[in-house]
Image (cartoon, coloured by chain):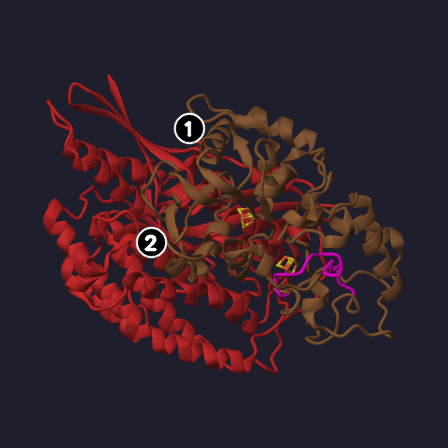
Chain colours: A red, B brown
Amino acid sequence: MTTLTFPLSRIEGHARVEIEVHEGEVISTRFQAMEKRGFNLMVQGAPAEQMPVIVPRICGVCSTAHHVASVKALEDAYGVQPPPLANQIRELLLLGQLIQNQATSLFVFTMPDRLGVESIFHITDEEADQTSQFNIAKRALMVRQLGTDLISLAGGQFIHPVKAVVGGVSSSIDQEKADAFRQRLKAALPLACELVDYYWEISLRMKDRIGTWGDDQPAYYISSTERDNPRYNSSIIRVMTPAGECCREFTANAFRKELTFEETDYSYAGRTSYQGGVIRANSLARANMTRSMGIRRADAYMRRLRREFGHPAHPILLFDLCRGIELVYAIELASQLLEVDFSHQEIDLHYTPRDGEGWGLVEAPRGPLIHHYVIEKGNIAFGEFIIPTVHNMLAIERALRVAAERYIHDDQVDLELEQAVGRVVRAFDPCIACATH
Amino acid sequence: MTLKKPPRFAVLQLSGCAGCEVSLLNANEWIDQFDLAFMPLVTSAYDVPEVEVLLISGGVRSDEDLHNLRQAVKRTKKIVAVGTCAISGGVANLGNRDEVRRLFLSQTERHDLPRLLPKSQPVDTFVDVDLYLPGCPPTPELFMGALLGPEDFVASKTVCQECGRKKLKDMKPAHLTGSRGGEVDPDICLINQGYLCVGSSTRGGCRALCTRPGHPCVGCRGPSDILIEKDSQVWLESIQRIFAAMTDIPAEEIHEALLSPQLSLFLFQFSDYAGTGQAPRPKEKVL
Ligand code: SF4
Ligand code: SF4
C-alpha cells in the first residue's frame, strides 16, 4: 500500500491530505488538521464576561462570528434580549466578516487555481490583460478590505472586534461615518460584480479544461439562515435532505441531540454527521436552502445559478460560485442596513449576570457556529465551540475520494491529482484554527 | 532598505489564529514595495526561500512548529516576531496553567500528527529575534512600520496619549463597571466611567483602536517603554496608582481584576507573569 501526502496552502491553518492507494485502488482519503491550541480547556475559569474578548482569538479569519456567538451565549444564560438597533449593528458586523471572508476565499485562495499562478500577487499584467483591463490583485484586495473596514466601523477593532457586549453594543455607529461608508459600498458594488463575473468566467474555463464541476453524491445540507432574506445573526438551524426537502429545524441548545459528533485519531479536528449521513455547510448549503435573497443584484446571480445548475445543486465547485453571490449580497445589504438612523436609539440594556447555561448561534461564513457555556460563580466552568468546518469534514473526505478515484489509475497517478486535491479542499474553505481551536 | 529591487519577505505562520496575516493583507501598500516570497495562507509555496525579512506569527506549540521555525530562520537576514502569540506563546499561553496543561496533553495527543510540546513557547525561546512587533494583531500601519523601518515610525508613548478622551477630576467611580455599564460616553476617559482600561500603561502605536469606540484597552500592544524592561510588579503598581488617583475604587478590587486571564493574555505578554522565565526584551527592539 502506498500513501500519498499532500501539504496544503492557500487555506486557513495547517492541514494536509493523505490518500492511501493499493494497486490503483483508493483505500482511504483523510483530511488531517495538524494544529491544536485547546481553547475549550483554556477558557475554563475565565470570567464569563471576558469571553467576547478572548474567543475572537480562536481565529483571526472568523473572529467576528466568535465574538457575536459568545455575546449571544452569555445573553442566553443571563436572559437578556438586546435592543433592535444593537442587533442591526451585529448583523453589519457579520456582513463585514462575510465580505472579508468570501473575498479572501474567492480571490486569494481559489483564483490562483483558475489562473494557474502561485498566488494572486503573481498574476502578471499580460495574464490579467487577456480578459480584462484591470489589476485584479489590487481590486480584489480593495473589495476585501471593505469587509475589514466594515468590521472596524461596526465592531471597533478591525480583526478582533470589541463592540458587541452583553445587552447590546458598547457604542453606536457615527451617522456621518455610516453615510460615507455607504457611499464606498455603493461605489464598490459594480467592481465586486465585475470581479464575480470574471471569477464565474474563469471557473467555466477551468471546468472545460478539467471536465467536471467536481461531482459527488448529494448530501444533507445545514444552515441557520432563513429561507427568505437570509440573516447571519441567526436563531434556528435547519437541515435539508439530499433531495431538497427541509426536514428538521432546531435551536442551538439541541445540537447534541440532532447531530452526531466523533473524534478521530488522525486529526486534531473531529467530525459531525446527521442521522448517519454526510452533511455540508457553508455557501452552497445556504444557497440551496434560500428561496430569495431579497435584494436585486444577489437575486440575479441566484437565478443564474439555478438556471445553470438546477436546485438543489450539488457539484463541489459551486461552493466557490455561491461565495461570489454572497459577496455581492453582503455589499448590497450592508449599504441598505447603513441607511437607518443610528442616533437616539437604545443600543445597550442593563442586565444582571447570573450563573447558568447558555448557547449562542450565528451563521459564520462556513456555516452555523455555536458557543455553549456553563457559568458558575461568574466564571466559565465548561465551554465548547461547535465549529462549522467540523460539519464539513466527512463531506471533504468523500469529495476527496471522488477526486482521487478520478485521477488514480491502475498503472499511474495523473499529475492533475495534486491540483484537484487543492481545489476540492478550498471549495469547502475549511478553517483549521477554528476546527481544532 | 526600501530602495532598488524590492526586498523579499516571507511570513511563517506557527500556531496562531491567522489574524496577524489578515491584518498584513490589509496593509496593501506593501504590494508595490515588497516581494512576497512565501506566505502559505496566500501562496502555494511550501518552503521558505532566501529572504531579507522573515515575519513570524504564532507560538511554538508543536514539534512541527519548532522544526519549521529552525529551518526558516536559516534563510533570512532579519527576524521579526509578530503579534502576541509569537512574542509570548500567545493566547495558547493561557493553557500554561499546570492543571489545564495536564488535562490538555492527556486529551489531545494523537499518534499520526505533530506532537504537541508541553507548553506553547514564544519564538525567542529558540531563536534570536531582531524586532518585536506587538499587537493582537498589529495594525496594518504597524506592519508597514516594521517593514519600512521602525526608526521612522512615529507613535505616542502610550495608548492614553493617542486616545483623546478627556480625563475629569470630579468623576470618581466607586466600583468597576464590568462590562455592564450601558452606553459609554464618547468623550470621557473610560477610567472615569469605571472601566478597567490599561491604556495608560500600554505602548502607543495602535492609535487607540479599541478605546475610541468605547472599549477599554486590554493592553495587546504590551507595556510602554518606561515599563517594558521592568518587572511586571512595577506595571501592576503603576496601573494601581492611576486608579487610586482617578477613582474611589478599592485597591483590592483593581488588583483582582488586573490578574484576570484577559489581561494576562495581553498586557502581560512581555512579562514573567505566565512563568516563562524570559529576560525582559530591550525596548530598542520593540516597535
Ligand atoms: S497575536 Fe493575536 S492576531 Fe496574531 S495570531 Fe496571535 S491571536 Fe491571532
Ligand atoms: S487599544 Fe489597547 S487593546 Fe486595543 S489595539 Fe490598542 S493596545 Fe491593543
Disc with the residue nearer the chain's start (2 vs 1):
2
Q: Which residue is mark 1?
A: A264
Q: Which residue is mark 2?
A: A108
- The residue drawn where x is 47% and y is 28% is B67
Residue A36 lies left or right of residue A198; in this view the side is right
Reply yes or no: does residue B204 show up in magenta.
yes
- Residue A94's spot in the image, x, y percent? 46, 62
Magenta region: B194-207
Could you say where residue B261 lies in the image, as x and y percent from the top left? 70, 45
Q: Nearer the viewer, residue A384 or A401?
A: A401
Which chain is home to disc 1?
A
Give the quadrant of the N terminus of chain A: top left
Residue type at mark 2: give it: Val
Query: Where A276 falls versus A315 (above or below)?
Result: above
Question: Can residue A277 be seen in the rendering of this structure?
Answer: no
Residue depicted at x 72% and y 73%: B165
